[in-house]
Amino acid sequence: MENLFEKEINRSTIFEDRNVLSPHYLPDQLPYREEEITKVMKVIAPALSQKRPSNLFLYGKTGVGKTAVVKHVMEKLDETKKKYEAQVDSIYLNCRTHNTKYQVLLKLAQRAEPNESFLGLSSTHLYEKFVEYVDKGLVFIVVLDEIDKVKDLDDLVYALTRANDDLKKGHIALVGISNKINFKEKLDPRSKSTLCQDEMVFAPYNAEQLSAILADRAKEGFRKGYITDGAIGLAAAFAAQESGDARYALRLLLKAGEFADAQDTKATEEYVKKARSAVEEDIVIELINTLPEHQSIVLYAIANLTAEGSKYRRLTDNGERLLFSGEAYEGYESLCKKWKTMARSARWFREYLNELDMMGLITMTMSGPGIRGNTRLIKLSFPPGKVKAAVEKRFA
């Protein structure tokens, strides 16, 4: 049989370095984020003089450079501390993966004692190990990306911020990154009172900025002449419509390149248009796979009602079906009963709707004239069949 691996390795490709086009690639320069880098550096800089930095929270929509800026600054901090032998340490954790106080404390304890096994030990023991490590005179910076995903966030924030009261020599500072500018409102007053934080909000990129960012990446990612200026401009325009999301723009460019590469031709605007639907479908599946259980059930109920039709009078928006929040809640309760799980209260249901709206899986508007009362109308943002299939696959 023909060795397909050898054939794949030896075939020509339009890519020079496809890794450069990944949303996870961290370039040496971050265009249009110089001001944000400077601000973060100023907040973190006291650590190099053995002083405790302020806690820092960064907000902004997906793909506006929050994580890239923080990682860039932490790399520079690491280089500088080695040069000046400063007693500084740091850790970056993504809270989609480490989404409990215990999991975060476990990673911190493992940083303190890399060769020790902490299997089965209590969170108190993990906390004490970490504090003991910092108390050697370190300034330790804990970066928590998507911090709002931590289930017992109150306890974690309180533990990390109040730890400074237990330290004689060292200091702990917290850097939180979140898409939700109001996530702290859900914190217990006890936790909020200990934060004493600086805050920054990242503005979305505009089409011109996105076009320049993509052009820089395309120079390194594609072989010369294998992507058109029109393709770059269209990917930037699509991403500008999606809240200035640079990650989305890069995914469009990479997917367009993959389609073009399969045909051994240059990436053009047509391939970007083709990439758009494929990328959006990938994003939906990724989002659904990360949803908590009850948010998934709410989304499935909305998809169900959208597909099957409302028992109330039909409401549409440009031909697309709208749902009353009340009937969506009834659908959610019915599914919970069917799937043998306890339905949450109407207050929690409203929170789940807000989360789904913020992620772009649904859109909500207030009812207008002609409808008795004041209720929220819900519209599913993606085809109901695809949404249902993704949820069913997750719970299969």
Image: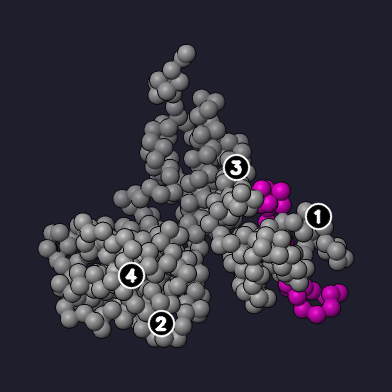
**Residue 254 rendering spot, x and y as whole percentages:** 49, 40
Label disc, if present, on residue 278 of the rendered structure: 3
Image point (47%, 79%), residue name: 187
Q: CA distance from mark 3 to mark 2?
A: 42 Å
Instruction: Tell me the element at label 1.
Output: helix
Q: Is residue 372 magenta?
A: yes
Q: How packed is label 4: few (under 14 Cα within 10 Å), some, or many (20 or more)?
A: few
Mark 3 vs mark 2: give the one in front.
2
- Dividing the picture into quadrants, the one containing residue 81 is bottom left
Identify residue type, mark 4: Ser
**Residue 78 rendering spot, x and y as whole percentages:** 22, 59
Identify residue type, mark 3: Ala
Query: Do labels 4 and 2 touch, CB within 8 Å?
Result: no
Lateral position of residue 10 relative to residue 367, left or right: left
Image point (66%, 70%), residue name: 343
Q: Which residue is mark 2?
A: 191
The number of discs equals: 4
**Nearest the eye: 99 or 79:** 99
Q: CA distance from mark 1 to mark 3?
A: 25 Å
Mark 1 vs mark 3: give the one in front.
1
Q: Which numbered disc flags the more N-terminal residue, 1 or 3?
A: 3
Instruction: Tell me the element at label 2.
Output: helix
Q: In the image, is residue 76 above or below residue 189?
A: above
The furthest residue to the top: 1
